[in-house]
Amino acid sequence: MRKIKLIWDFKGQAAAKTAEHHEIHLKEYIHNERLSLNITGFEIINDMYAIAFLVVEEKDMIPVRDVLKPHRGEVYIS
């Protein structure tokens, strides 16, 4: 089954800290909703831009997207 990477973008001086903190909430969501995958992370792109992400199975993408409102998504390739 295909996996989808849901992405949240953070910009500004606090981007890295915000993305890192957002990942904590994504992990809580995975635990609370008992999702089958537990792939999360954050990446610092540069000093003013970072992302947080959550990977879900394609079948779970729409309900998770509707609740968590990511900024964008892409097919996840491990």
Image: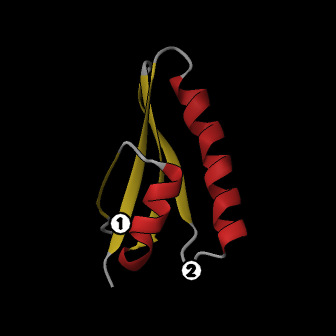
Q: Residue at x 31, y 78 (%)?
A: 2
Q: Residue at x 52, y 55 (%)?
A: 67
Tell me the crowding category of disc 1: few under 14, some 14 to 19, or many 20 or more residues within 10 angstroms, Cα based.
many
x, y (%) of residue 16?
54, 28
Residue 35 lies, with reference to residue 64, above or below; the image says below
Would you say 69 lies left or right of 18 here? left
Residue 19 lies, with reference to residue 58, above or below; the image says above
How far is disc 2 from disc 1 in space, using C-alphas?
A: 13 Å
Compare marks 2 and 1 and give the one earlier in the sequence.
1
x, y (%) of residue 73?
32, 54
Q: Residue at x 52, y 51 (%)?
A: 68
Q: Residue at x 36, y 75 (%)?
A: 58
Residue type, numbered disc 2: Ser
> Mark 2: which secondary structure?
loop
* Residue on which disc 2 sits: 36
* Quarter of image, res 38: bottom right
Outermost residue, top direction? 13
Would you say 70 lies left or right of 22 here? left
* Residue on which disc 1 sits: 4
x, y (%) of residue 53?
47, 51
Tell me the crowding category of disc 2: few under 14, some 14 to 19, or many 20 or more residues within 10 angstroms, Cα based.
few
For the image, the number of numbered tags is: 2
Residue 41 lies, with reference to residue 19, above or below; the image says below
Can residue 15 be seen here? The reply is yes
Would you say 17 lies left or right of 68 here? right
Viewer-proximal residue, 44 or 75? 75
> Mark 1: which secondary structure?
strand
Can residue 54 be seen here? The reply is no
Viewer-proximal residue, 60 or 3? 60
Residue 57 lies, with reference to residue 29, above or below; the image says below
Residue type, numbered disc 1: Ile
> Which quarter shows the C terminus?
bottom left
